[in-house]
């Protein structure tokens, strides 16, 4: 299938004019979408009209939906869909949201032994102000690293800890964060290479997580912090960042093995934000 794809200026991402909700069983759609995702690392599908079932069908184009999600915000009857929201109903958060807390650059599910390959985020209620999602092209940033820094980080392994993530999110939000771990909290730490090699494209990228990484194997805490701060500053510097300002009906899909992302602050007392998320293997 020939998709209508318009690359965004800046080198990360593309807009795709395609209605993912429309019925159709074209077997070439899924490979075409996957090829576009691997090429552009992030795809924006504007003006979608997806119910929960449609979102699962759209997600299946990119891989097998991960159903191992935080049970607090799982959408009943639609395994793998998580509510992402700052809305609080009767004192209970409607969804997971860390956007009012400290900026937390991350790749989704890095606290699991196997990262999910892609994330889909579908916007239903958009705030008038704030609540954008920023994406950092850690693939291009890795390519641009000085050779000696590439050499220094080659082979290093980072320890990802959901307990650390939960503790820091709770601390940053004064105990108010709806994000902090929930039913996923009891997992053991996992190690991932700091430099990832993409299983499809072979491109290399840096896997960071401002709150989830507890340390680097064999490095002292001081050296770890200095190195991670330096890498994060490089990867999230302006030339590598795309900021998505949500419109209702946007579906954004990103290659979770190639880029990092973070939610931007939004004044939850004034602006509501509601999205639905899936991750795929
Ligand atoms: C996420 O971290 O997957 C959600 C990002 C967002 O809420 O903008």
Image: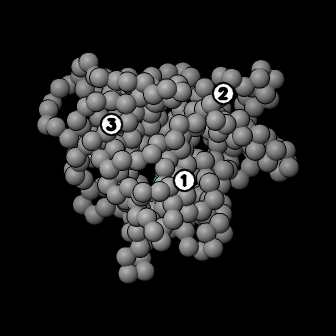
For residue 142, the mark is 2
Q: Earlier in the sequence, mark 1 or mark 3?
A: 3
- Extreme top residue here? 2
Badge 2 crowding class, 10 Å Cα cut-off, few under 14, some 14 to 19, many 20 or more, is many
Which sits in the foreground, 77 or 149?
149
Residue 179 % position (x, y): 51, 63
Q: Earlier in the sequence, mark 3 or mark 2?
A: 3
Residue 215 % position (x, y): 74, 49
At mark 1, the secondary structure is loop
Which corner quadrant of the image does residue 73 belong to?
bottom left
Residue 55 % position (x, y): 27, 47
* Residue in the picture at 49% in, 50% down: 132
Residue 100, compared with residue 157, is above or below; it is: below
Q: Earlier in the sequence, mark 1 or mark 2?
A: 2
Ligand 1 under 8 Å from disc 2 Cβ: no
Q: Quadrant of the N terminus?
A: top left
* Residue in the picture at 28% in, 63% down: 76
Instruction: Report which residue position mark 3 lands on.
Output: 45
* Residue in the picture at 38% in, 55% down: 126
In the image, taking residue 115 as reference, residue 66 lies left or right, namely: left
Per the model, the C-alpha gap separating discs 3 and 2 is: 27 Å
- Could you tell me if the residues under marks 3 and 2 are in contact, i.e. CB atoms within 8 Å? no
- Extreme bottom residue here? 90
Q: Please tell me how many numbered marks the rendered image carries.
A: 3
Which corner quadrant of the image does residue 46 belong to?
top left
For residue 264, the mark is 1
């Amino acid at each position: 299938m020939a998709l209508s794809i318009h690359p965004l200026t800046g080198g990360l991402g593309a807009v795709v004019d395609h209605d993912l909700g429309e019925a159709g069983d074209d077997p070439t759609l899924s490979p075409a979408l996957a090829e576009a995702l691997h090429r552009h690392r992030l795809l924006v599908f504007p003006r979608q009209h997806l119910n929960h079932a449609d979102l699962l069908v759209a997600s299946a184009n990119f891989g097998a939906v991960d159903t191992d999600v935080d049970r607090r915000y799982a959408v009943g009857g639609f395994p793998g869909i998580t509510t992402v929201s700052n809305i609080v109903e009767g004192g209970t958060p409607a969804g997971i949201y860390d956007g009012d807390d400290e900026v937390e650059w991350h790749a989704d599910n890095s606290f699991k032994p196997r990262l999910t390959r892609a994330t889909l985020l579908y916007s239903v209620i958009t705030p008038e102000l704030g609540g954008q999602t920023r994406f950092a092209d850690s693939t291009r940033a890795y390519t641009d690293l000085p050779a000696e820094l590439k050499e220094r980080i080659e082979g290093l392994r980072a320890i990802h800890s959901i307990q650390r993530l939960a503790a820091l999110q709770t601390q940053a939000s004064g105990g108010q964060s709806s994000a902090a771990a929930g039913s996923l909290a009891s997992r053991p730490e996992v190690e991932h290479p700091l430099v990832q090699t993409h299983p499809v494209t072979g491109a290399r990228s840096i896997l960071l997580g401002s709150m989830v990484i507890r340390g680097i194997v064999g490095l002292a805490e001081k050296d770890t912090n200095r190195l991670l701060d330096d890498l994060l500053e490089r990867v999230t510097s302006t030339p590598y960042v795309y900021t998505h300002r949500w419109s209702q009906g946007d579906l954004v899909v990103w290659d979770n093995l190639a880029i990092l992302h973070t939610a931007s602050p939004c004044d939850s007392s004034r602006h509501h934000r509601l999205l639905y998320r899936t991750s795929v293997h």
